[in-house]
Image (spheres, rainbow, N blue to C red):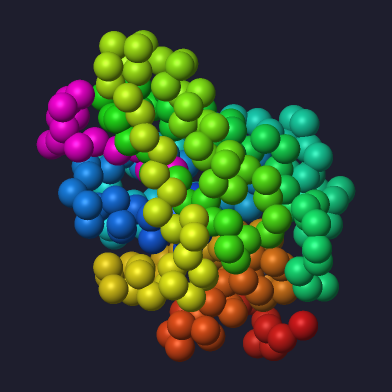
Amino acid sequence: MTTPTRHGKTAVVLLSGGLDSATVLAMAREQGYVCHCLSMDYGQRHRAELDAAARVAEALGAAHHRVVKIDLAGFGGSALTDDSIAVPTDGIAPGIPVTYVPARNTILLSFALANAEVAGANDIFFGANAVDYSGYPDCRPDYVKAYEAMANLATRAAIEGQRLTVHTPIIALSKADIIRTGIALGVDYALTVSCYQATTDGLACGQCDACRLRCAGFEQAAVADPTRYKKLNKNK
Ligand code: ZN
């Protein structure tokens, strides 16, 4: 059993169940961190990604996996949290899409920050990506830097000298490079679910932005796509 201390290499890893955060967990483990994975049941459309997160945490040797329930669907305002807003399936359009969840990453990081302070972790790993992403403002390097600066003003741990670092090791990687990195670290992407509207069994639609980015990433990395799609024809 792992007993985290303020002096150990304990990290909190935000784990969605998707491809990016699975890779980030593998990278944190490679760097020797004892990983406390945190997944948020925030009212997203499907639970398949939370089931995936549990599989990924176990497969990649997380010390803990915790699922915290919050209710962003109480506000809605996103195709991921409001059933009356359709997930776009016509291709990736310019601008910030309706799958943006208002302030989601700030909220998720704040839970990770609280978890880190309690666990004695000085490090948070977060799978933000600013290359093959969907135009979300809270995935950009400037945002992450600002969050880290805020976090170091916000906690007792930081004021007492335990400064926090927010690691975003895939922020500048293409999806193909993320996949190559994960494969080299033994990530089984068949365990992950990226689709914005996966079935309860974790079958992907093949048409949403997340599916398109993921599929293109496997093609560019020349890695067989292990995604289970709900239709045989995943093109268009
Ligand atoms: Zn999809």
Side (left or right) of 18 relative to 90: left
Which image quadrant: the N terminus?
top left
Relative height, residue 194 to residue 99 (above, below): below
Side (left or right) of 171 relative to 195: left
At horizontal 62% and vertical 61% (from top left) the residue drawn is 133
Side (left or right) of 47 relative to 23: right
The residue nearer to you, when weighing 113 against 50, is 113
179 drawn magenta: no
Q: Residue 215 falls in which quadrant of the image?
A: bottom right
At horizontal 62% and vertical 43% (from top left) the residue drawn is 138
Magenta-drawn segment? 1-14
Magenta: main secondary structure: loop
Residue 15 seen from this side: no
Q: Residue 208 falls in which quadrant of the image?
A: bottom right
5 drawn magenta: yes
At horizontal 48% and vertical 75% (from top left) the residue drawn is 176
Q: Residue 187 falls in which quadrant of the image?
A: bottom left
Relative height, residue 131 to residue 225 (above, below): above
Residue 92 seen from this side: yes
Q: Position of residue 174 (x, y in %)?
A: 51, 69
Q: Position of residue 123 (x, y in %)?
A: 32, 36
Q: Position of residue 113 (x, y in %)?
A: 43, 27
